[in-house]
Image (cartoon, grey):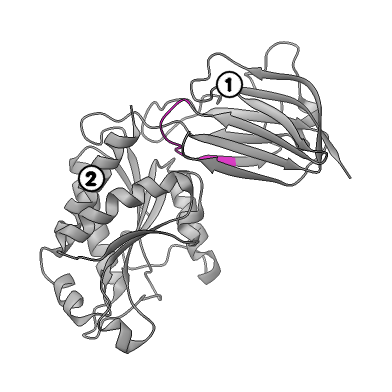
Amino acid sequence: RSFQLTNVLIRPEPPAVRNSGPRPANTCVDLLLSGRTSFDVQETVTPPAIVLRLHRCTLAMNELAHYTADRLVGHATLRQVRPDLVELRLPLKGRAIWGWSTAYGVCANMSTDPPGHDFAKYAPEDLRLTIKAPPVVSQKLHGLTVVLDPGHGGPDSGAIGLHGLREKDINLRVALAVRKTLIADGATVVMTRTTDRAVGRNRNDELPARVRVARKAHGDIFISIHHNARPQVSDGRVAHGTFVYYYQPQSAELARCLADPVANIQHEPVRAYVYRSLHVVRQPYMPAVLIEVGFISNPTCEARMRAPGYPQAIAKAVANGLLHYIRESLP
């Protein structure tokens, strides 16, 4: 079965209450379809754009309406790429993508519909793409909401060093130090956990629960903090390096900006930012990275992690990397 796309509306998101005061308006892109069909969303970094592709779909357009109050999207283009594939390209006016989400059936009877445009009959089939507005950041990190995720916790200890240091414990110590440093720089900080506990309802829910915390907080940045290990003991004892993982293209620059400061503060010569499919960094809702600060399986590195000033040193490095990222990414 083939479905038809009849209308596209690009407009500011309806007002919503946010946890950290007034926020820039996100942009809603509502696609009115004759039925639900499969789709995929792709990002391009240079130039920044979001591309939505509808499969088993044909154009039967009445209009593509782009409301002038929208401040995020440039001149959108819509085309029938193949007989069964429609592509909507949304160039962004800013220098970076700050996140997006999609959902079916959320745009019936919106208060922003102009007079005479009642799309309630399409509601179950309507597809909404919401594009996240960049934060307004001033005076270091004022205006930025950062979600910190100390990896593991509760029954999940993570890796354990040769001399007994548990990853879940050092992850939390570092994350709490990062929170204190970022708050001093003006950021709002939300933690997925602040004590030695699990976050999810069960083992299968553990990683999705951490993403839910970030979404509920309307986070601007997500940083998961871990310490690395190798599965083979002989490898683990000599492995070293700082690695920052990302998945969405929007997160690559954040990963790059964090890798060097975190490695430098430890005098670590090996550092890299790495594309990898990990659950917490696959989320497209905000730039998201996972930092493997160092190798807990290496006794030399483990000893460094036990030093009293270690969490504060890593926190300072993370804050410096984040400040650099904000300066590069925002106008």
Q: Quadrant of the N terminus?
A: top right
Whether residue 147 is visible: no
Q: Which residue is painted at 44% across and 38% down in the image? A: 98
Quarter of the figure with residue 308: bottom left
* Residue position marked by numbered label 2 in the rendering: 182
Kindly state the secondary structure of the residue where label 2 is placed.
Answer: helix
Instruction: Give the x, y percent position of residue 330.
Output: 34, 31
Looking at the image, residue 286 lies above or below residue 246? above
Check residue 98 for magenta coloring.
yes
The local crowd at label 2, few if under 14, some if 14 to 19, many if 20 or more residues have their Cα within 10 Å, is: many
Whether residue 113 is visible: yes
Instruction: Give the x, y percent position of residue 128.
Output: 65, 34
Quarter of the figure with residue 115: top right
* Residue position marked by numbered label 1 in the rendering: 75
Q: Which residue is painted at 31% across and 32% down in the image? A: 143
Instruction: Give the x, y percent position of residue 178.
Output: 23, 53
Residue at the extreme left of the image, as rendered: 308
Looking at the image, residue 185 lies above or below residue 76? below
The residue nearer to you, when weighing 295 against 218, is 295
Instruction: Give the x, y percent position of residue 164.
Output: 24, 83
Q: In this view, does 247 lie to the left or right of 139?
A: right
Q: Earlier in the sequence, mark 2 or mark 1?
A: 1
Q: Which range is magenta?
A: 93-101
Q: Main secondary structure of the magenta part?
A: loop
Quarter of the figure with residue 52: top right
Looking at the image, residue 8 lies above or below residue 35? above
